[in-house]
Image: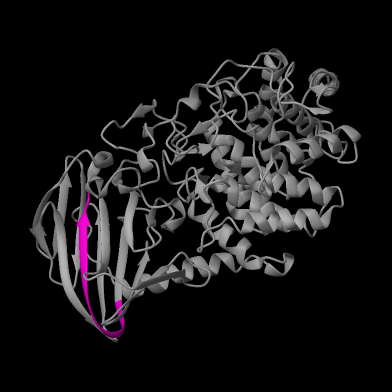
Amino acid sequence: MSRPIEDYGLIADGRSAALVSRDASIDWLCWPRFDADACFAALVGTAEHGHWSLRPERGASRCERCYEPDTLVLQTDFHTPDGAVRVTDFMPPTTHGDAPSLVRIVGGLRGTVTMRSTLAPRFDYGARVPSFARERDALVARAGPSSVALYTDVPADIRERAIVSTFEIHAGERRSFTLRYGDDAGPIDVERELDRTRGDWRDWIRAFDDRRTPWPDAVRRSLLVLRALIYRPTGAMVAAPTTSLPEVPGGSMNWDYRYCWLRDASFALDALLDAGFHHEARAWRDWLLRAIGGTPERIRILYRVDGSVVNRERCIDALPGWNGARPVRVGNAATEQRQLDVFGEVMDCLHVVRAAGSGASPEEVELERRIVEHLERNWRKPASGIWEIRSARRQYTLARVMVWVALDRFLMHASAPSRPRQADDDLIERARALHATIHREVCENAWSDTRGAFTRAEGSDELDASLLLMPLVGFLPIDDERVRATVDAIGRELGDGGLIRRLPRGKEGPHEGTFIACSCWMADCLLMLGRDRDARALFERVLGMANDLGLLAEEYDVDDKQLAGNFPQALSHLALVQTALRFDHPHRTRR
């Protein structure tokens, strides 16, 4: 049996991230960046596929863990009959040219405890067992172009295809392990790096004014998680640091989320700007412009952290998957899908940054013009929807709404009297006419008299929780009777255990969990409707789904009472931040 997803904590360095289990086993790490190959892959395999355990040799009667305040420095305390010990895990922030590091400090709290460290790296997602060698002051593991070096102040031996250390720790003593990517990086000053790492997180989060929300601790933690998912050299934010944690237990809905979705960009910018992090929002916007380049007609819905195209999807047959959920995928075939809604999200992204005071470059204005011209030619074509269902393309309602958003944001800036002319009059008039046409057609064709609600696609009677975004992006006001009816229908028919499913039960598998972001969108709509008590109850239900460290996955399985999907999930934490801050501004839309 695999460990429950909620058993894991996150540590990160601004380029990659590791997952650490409740008993201090590092079971997932891709080095040197989020979308690189994994050297610890036990999360979706077994210990033999790469892990690093560090725990009392005779076991522990009790384990406790927490983050040091306002950091991603993780502490795990083990209590044994012989004493107590603390393991402190962190990844120092990297700068240009630095070799990435992962540091583990063992500190004695009480008595004397015998500890055992088993470092078993496996490169290429567990497929390659490295050779091990002792070189100068390091123990090095190599396989092909990949290598890691361990520096430690305790005795260590090479045996059983791993680097093993067994040592005693007394109260007041500290011992350390530093794993570095590359075999010639050299040792570091562990205590200095610990102080630097603490300062890096705390200096950053200090910009957030936690008086703005009744849930300051949850929002601060979510903001720290979001920062941990940003690839700092480019400013791009990955959807999650993991691949193939299943959305449906034992099923095949196992996707690689270690990439940057343009769809997340507008949510990320809105949340970061609202929380006061303008530098990160502008960096995300700049990455977005670089990734798209000058060819919006060839836009992809997701990219790698450096803006390059995501690799072709493949399956790692040697990995058995989390609790047997196969296949384990690397790459994501969604990169080949046509999704019209992404253009609305790109234009909304540019809009929210401008609204925060950043001007538009000539290249940005040209990109917007080309997007509008592209949508003129292609807006009626069926496409894949927001949930990236791998089936026939359809006329999805939200896709039409987001095309309208693209035109709406263009018109807001291009035709504003106080702004320089940004497009020729003919294009503005054509965009204005299309803006009105799409709005009319959605209102006529996506409304179902049978259901008394807007539905997932033209000609469909299916509900879809993504339509909760209609009032949030400004397509229709919240007091429109059709919007009210749709919100009520989604709450009534997609509600489950106080949370919201994205689609009717069974549509994407009989055991798919409730969708955390959709639950936050519902709380947003309830707030806009003035139903503050209902909104608060729903939002606090979402907060209760986080694990003991405040981390959320993509979904929550109400039946099995556990998190599901890739972890931690950026969209879930973005939605949490947006909703928590909306309680001060309940009627705010992204328009």
Q: Is residue 155 magenta?
A: no
- Side of 556 where 60 appears, left or right: left
Q: At which x and y percent is residue 80?
A: 30, 77
Numbered disc total: 0
- Residue segment shown in magenta: 107-121
Residue at 46% across, 39% down: 249
Residue at 79% across, 39% down: 487
- Side of 575 where 6 appears, left or right: left
Q: At which x and y percent is residue 407?
A: 76, 27
Give the colouring mode of the picture: one colour
The answer to whether residue 588 is visible is no
Q: Indicate the quadrant containing the C terminus: top left, top right, bottom left or bottom right.
A: top right
Residue at 61% across, 46% down: 516
The answer to whether residue 187 is visible is yes
Q: At which x and y percent is residue 412?
A: 81, 35
- Side of 18 where 538 appears, left or right: right
For the stretch drawn in magenta, what is the main secondary structure? strand
Residue at 25% across, 34% down: 318
Q: At which x and y percent is residue 576?
A: 65, 53
Q: Quadrant of residue 59?
A: bottom left
Q: Is residue 285 above or below residue 430?
A: below
**Depth check: 555 or 323 in front?**
323
Q: Is residue 96 above or below residue 389?
A: below
Q: Quadrant of residue 10?
A: bottom left
Q: Is residue 118 magenta?
A: yes
- Side of 250 where 143 appears, left or right: left
